[in-house]
Amino acid sequence: VSSAEATQAHIDRIADVDSSVNAFLHVSDHAVAEATKIDERRAAGEVLHELAGVPVAVKDVLVTTDMPSTSGSKILEGYMSPYDATVVKKARAAGLIPLGKTNMDEFAMGSSTEHSAYGPTRNPWDLDRIPGGSGGGSAAAVAAFEAPLAFGSDTGGSIRQPAHVTGTVGLKPTYGGVSRYGAIALASSLDQIGPVARTVLDAGLFHDVIAGHDPHDATSLTNNWPSFAQAAREGATGEVLNGLKVGVVRELPDAAFQPGVAESFHQSLAILEQQGAEIVEISAPHFEYAVAAYYLILPAEASSNLAKFDSVRFGLRADVPGTVEDVMAATRDAGFGPEVKRRIILGTYALSAGYYDAYYGSAQKVRTLIQRDFASAFASVDVIATPSAPTTAFKLGEKLSDPLAMYANDLTTIPANLAGVPGISLPSGLASDDGLPVGIQFLAPAYEDARLYRVGAALE
Ligand code: GLN
């Protein structure tokens, strides 16, 4: 098929199903025209990238010049960016076709996409269930065949947990491996952009396009990455599993997971062993404090990052009389949803004089201990495996009024962000207790993203 036909087919699919899935906040009105240009270049004999002409859904956390960028918030309703995020620019340069902007929890805060100011996304496997979050729109779009590829962002699991609950593949790169320039910041020391796809190889092909140094991002790494697509192709032979040491975390016992999730995990471990991998129990004694440390560090950084929504520089301005402070307060009151307000209050409190050392300081110490847990684990294993989340897709509304229950869902994804290491979630089957998708997560040392593609493709 031509790119124009493929792109039109996805636009048609969106028109058919998105009124019930709500994965997209905006659909491009010029995607087919862009695809036609790619077809013309190819017909003229130009040698294009392997992914040229393939449509891609863009999480609304990334700014784009040709479509609004809201990060799921009312405060940015209709906002048009004067520049493209570096990763979007790279995707366009490779000939990928941005299809539209996908729904997400407001400012990427959440695990269910129910905190979007534009209504929740629904899980295509069961429309009464959540598609994960914050990148539920991207994962649902890929799972519902509305897009073959999507951008995600992962601060505490927002690529991997949506992949887990929708039966898709998602990878959080090593911190600094992919540019954050033009990604609306949630918590800058944790945020990473990465691929969402239906296969490990597709994710690797897309990751190759977006990886690499960006002078616009001060924390961008300068190393040369190997080809992740090549790694996935090597892994597909399965030989990589022979002799591979896979760490299983003692402090994440089966009791921490829904029975069907734990069962699927053990089935995957059995397959790994059959293929010659060695399962090694490792200890990560500080993982149990990861969620607590994260929910101090994240609100602290987020409260600072969101200070720029001051009614003057970006987006909404409330039409109220009074001083600059009155307008600012009314704007932030009207523009931010309850979860965002909760985290701003938590974060400013944790950073305030007198409490800083007790809260933020302690959380940073826990972060260091978690980094050491990883370092000692990776001295004896090649990868760590965990279930990607404690449960399968829960029901819409189930955890919405209980923030701590929502936060607890991030148990297995958060440690990777605190340590900056890469992680992948790929489908491990359907849970025997509720028939819903389950993902297995692999974590590798920093810079070893290619290892995750090898192992993921071997197990796939
Ligand atoms: N669920 C986590 C949170 O609410 C993850 C967010 C993310 O990765 N963007 O913060």
Image (cartoon, rainbow, N blue to C red):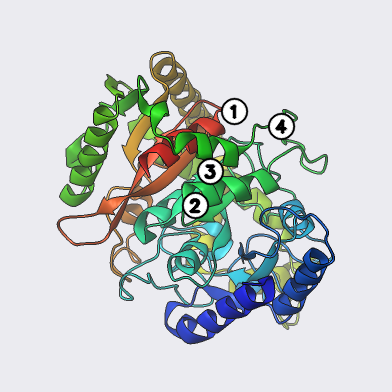
Mark 1 → mark 4, Cα distance in angstroms? 10 Å
Is the residue indicated by label 1 positioned so its CB lies within 8 Å of ligand 1? no
- Contact (Cβ within 8 Å) of mark 1 with mark 3: no
Q: Secondary structure at mark 1?
A: loop
Residue at 68 percent across and 42 percent down: it is 211
Q: Which mark is residue 172?
A: 3
- Contact (Cβ within 8 Å) of mark 3 with mark 2: yes
Mark 4 highlights which residue? 221
* Kind of residue at badge 3: Lys
Is the residue indicated by label 2 positioned so its CB lies within 8 Å of ligand 1? yes
Q: What count of labels does the image hold?
A: 4
Q: Secondary structure at mark 3?
A: strand
Residue at 44 percent across and 77 percent down: it is 21
Instruction: State the image coordinates of residue 228 (x, y, percent, origin top left).
Output: 59, 38
Q: Is 377 placed above or below 156 here?
A: above
Mark 3 → mark 4, Cα distance in angstroms? 15 Å
Q: Is 35 placed above or below 416 here?
A: below
* Kind of residue at badge 2: Ile
Mark 3 → mark 2, Cα distance in angstroms? 7 Å
Q: Which of label 1 and label 2 is nearer to you?
A: 1
Crowd rating for badge 1 (residues with CA inside 10 Å; few <14, some 14–19, many 20+): many
Mark 1 → mark 2, Cα distance in angstroms? 18 Å
Asked if residue 192 shows in the view, the reply is: no
Instruction: State the image coordinates of residue 45 (x, y, percent, origin top left).
Output: 83, 61
User: Which of 346 and 457 lies nearest the eye of the viewer?
Assistant: 457
In the displayed structure, does residue 271 sit left or right of residue 401? left
Q: Secondary structure at mark 2?
A: loop
Mark 2 highlights which residue? 159
Asked if residue 240 shows in the view, the reply is: yes
Mark 1 highlights which residue? 447
Mark 1 → mark 3, Cα distance in angstroms? 12 Å
Mark 4 → mark 2, Cα distance in angstroms? 20 Å
